[in-house]
Image: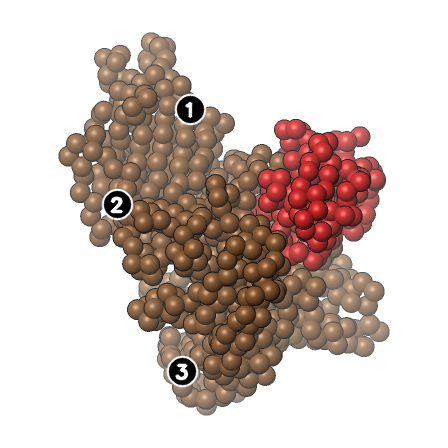
Chain colours: A red, B brown
Amino acid sequence: MPTYQIDVNGTFQSVDVSADTPLLWVLRDHLDLVGTKYGCGIGQCGACTVHVDGIAMRSCSLTLEQVKDKSITTIEGLSEFGEHPVQQAWKEVDVPQCGYCQTGQIMTASAFLESNPNPSGDEIRNAMHGNICRCASYNRIYRAVEKAAENMD
Amino acid sequence: METNGKMAFSRRAFMRTTGLAGGGMLIGFNLFQACKPKVKLEPPVDLSKLQYKDFNAFIKIAENGVVTLFSPNPEIGQGVKTSMPMIIAEELDVAWKNVHVVQGKLDTENFDRQVAGGSQSLRHGWDALRQTGATAKQMLVNAAAARWGIDASECTVSEGVITSPTGETLGYGEVVTEAAHLEVPENVSLKKPSEYKIIGKNAQNVDIDEIITGKPLFGLDYKADGMVYAAVVRPPAFGQKLVSFDATKAMGMPGVLDVVAIGEKARKLIEAHPNLGGILSESDKVVVVAETTWQAFKAKEAIEAEWEDDSRMESTEDHDAELNALLDGKEFNTMREDGNVEKAFAEADEVLERTYEAPFLPHNCMEPMNFYAHITDEKVHLVGPIQTPAWKAGAVSAMLDRKPEEIELEMTRQGGGFGRRLYGDFVLEAAEIADKIRKPVKVVYTREDDMNDGIYRMALKYRIKAGIKDGKITAYHLKEAAVNSNMYGLIPNFFPAGAIENYKVDAAAYKSNITTGAWRAPYTNFLAFAEQSFFDELAELLDVDKVQMRIDLLKKVDAEADERIQYSPERMIKVIETAVEKSGWGNTPSNVYQGFVNYYCHNTHVAEVADVEIENGLPVVKKVTCVVDCGIVVNPLGALNQIEGGVLDGIGHSMYGDFGFENGKPMASNYDRYRLIRMKEAPVVETYFIENEIAPTGLGEPTLPPAGGAIANAFKAATGNRLYQQPFSKFPELLKPKEKEIIG
């Protein structure tokens, strides 16, 4: 099996995995970073969202070959103690019900606000539309993104 | 104040205290024993002999005053891990910020209602949780009073600090060791709702910090030393069974440790407990065991398996035909009958009859089914997300012929439940695998496994017929035809039972090999749409106001005279009137079309009004006004989340949820072909609570059923078309406004 050096949350990690292994399972099973969730495995639900060079991407659909020279950030690396404004907004609004999809939602929202710090309502809805929340906490997700945008000003 | 009177209990039987070796006090209480006064628990003569197994919930008060509550019920996103401890903390009189909450373990030996289901956790726990907190507080006060040499009634308490008349103070932590050795008092007084400091205030999810930072909380996140992963090759279609398989290719793949077949133990279990046949396949399955999840998933695809048809290979058209035949036939189980509907129909001036149809639905918990099992000669260790831990631990005990006390089951936080995790077929699977390979192992479903080896909401149809005589509704006949099972016995006593003189509910089922079961708000999740659409049509036929017709019917109900009636007409009228006021019913701008629904289920009364506007030629749900009477609202912040989620879930599934079969094979297996509601389809939800001092009821389910009816009635107002089948998105021609509506 090939050995890959990948930069996860600012640390270079060496992993031996077959070339087709999705980043998602490397994070979860090899690096113990289980905050990145498995939901569908085909890039449809967004539970596995991470940042690759600052862009929100679906880790279930990325191989290590595709990310080996890039910088990967997971929920564990978004902030040290959950102090990122998006995480704080999620807490303030008390978004989660079951909570399973929320790390993926937070990763999508944080990358989005980085590129668009003052979004309109429609822009928030478009940005978050790709992430499924089966508990349907959508209205709180929307309010948390709005609040995070305010707090990031 | 009203209590849940049917759940009275003796405090002596359910609560014990003991001192802790390291200082502090442990209060054990039996939350579910408290609901079942028939079961006797002999008090231990010696407190030092207090056994963990005698109790299923605990409060620990440490010498530093910190309170830890071990919450017994499974947390599936419904918020009980926050709200149940809030009730204890209120009566214990401690500051909520000083309370830590820990998920309790299962005690399989003594108790059987450690369940998340039916929106019952809060309702059942209300009295016991309050009594426990208040009793513990009284013991702490008694200890302080004894030290001061005064009467306990002279002391006051606030947030864990006891104060004497002369101004001396003692924290709970300072008297807790003495308190642990005092007699458990009887007849403690409970707070009045006006005195509440925690109940009724917003409390954040107790796991919020762990959730937003991605800590390992869920079953899929659980790891143990030496743990391996299992992926399971399941029959591709319902009705098929395994003939043979070739694992040569899979065994040569990276990380693959073993390939085994399972099924024998599950079949023996079904033989002994035939009711489990409804949730378990009788086929063998092929299990790939590997070092990582991905390796197991990949190798599973490389298994070459041969399957044969073992029973009828059913398709959606078959279910449609079978259910129609049941509705047209005469074989029904009559679940309630008042008066004589046949005679009333014969005498009626007019008869309205409509049929409503719904497909199967998968649960689609975001966290796919999974479970950890490690089985040795000494012990069976099970960990994971399960709504019914006791039931499943018992089944594992029976399946593996192991003593109940050898089984330890730990619950993780659960990435959604919706009824799917009631069944625990995945627990049995994990146990059979672990018993065979004797390694710590976690079975993980792919999303495709999760959607295609489901225990679905059954396809079902309702036919409703009403008779009208002299402008009054004189007869009402509801028939249910469903795959595998019929509505539970309380439902025929929901509205409009009691409001119509001649009333009958009939049910019939077609036995299928497709596994079905409870799905968030079983039966009512579709029945509410059917009945509430029908009421609207009745009002149109009678040419009366839709809301007034419902109120007039409710006013005829004498719930005191008929103890079978489940709902309160007075509470229902109050939610209806509040919904009329808050939604601006009948007073909206001309571009807003409204649909009205009132509904009772799971002990909670709800009214919902959907506002629809036409955008780009199509109706769009913009807002839902939701009025809820769930008694005392324990945690408004959590309650609002449940209510909004229920409304949006109800809209999502009635709009998009479609799941069919072709020759036993599910027609969708992932989110590319199965649509769930997403953010842009989510309307605003405005919620209003009816304020009262009635004991609280649950919120995990009650707001879901009315939502489908509310939007269907609003679509009718907007388009002129009435919808009879779910999901609505399958009928685009009916979602277009009729021509005259556009011109008008």
Tags 2 and 1 touching, CB below 8 Å: no
Q: Residue at x 29, y 58 (%)?
A: B401
Which residue was labeled with disc 3? B332
Q: Quadrant of the C terminus of chain B?
A: bottom right
Which residue was labeled with disc 2? B9
Which of the two labelled residues, at mark 2 and mark 1, occupies the earlier sequence position?
A: 2
Q: Disc 3 residue type?
A: Phe
Q: Disc 2 residue type?
A: Phe
Q: Residue at x 38, y 47 (%)?
A: B381
Q: Residue at x 28, y 48 (%)?
A: B405
Q: Is residue A91 visible?
A: yes
Chain bearing tag 3 is: B
Mark 1, residues whose alpha carbon is within 10 Å: few (<14), some, or many (≥20)? some
* Circles 1 and 3 on the same subunit: yes
Which of the two labelled residues, at mark 3 and mark 2, occupies the earlier sequence position?
A: 2
Tell me where residue B265 appears, x and y as whole percent: 37, 65
Q: Residue at x 70, y 43 (%)?
A: A3
In terms of secondary structure, where does tag 2 sit? loop
Which residue was labeled with disc 1? B66
Q: Quadrant of the N terminus of chain B?
A: top left
Q: Nearer the viewer, residue B80 or B563?
A: B80
Q: Disc 1 residue type?
A: Val
- Residue B152 in the image: above or below residue B280: above
Q: Nearer the viewer, residue B194 or B112?
A: B112
Tags 1 and 3 touching, CB below 8 Å: no
Chain bearing tag 1 is: B
- Residue B661 in the image: above or below residue B343: above
Tell me where residue B149 appears, x and y as whole percent: 23, 13
- Residue B405 falls left or right of residue B646: left
Q: Is residue B477 visible?
A: no
* Circles 2 and 1 on the same subunit: yes
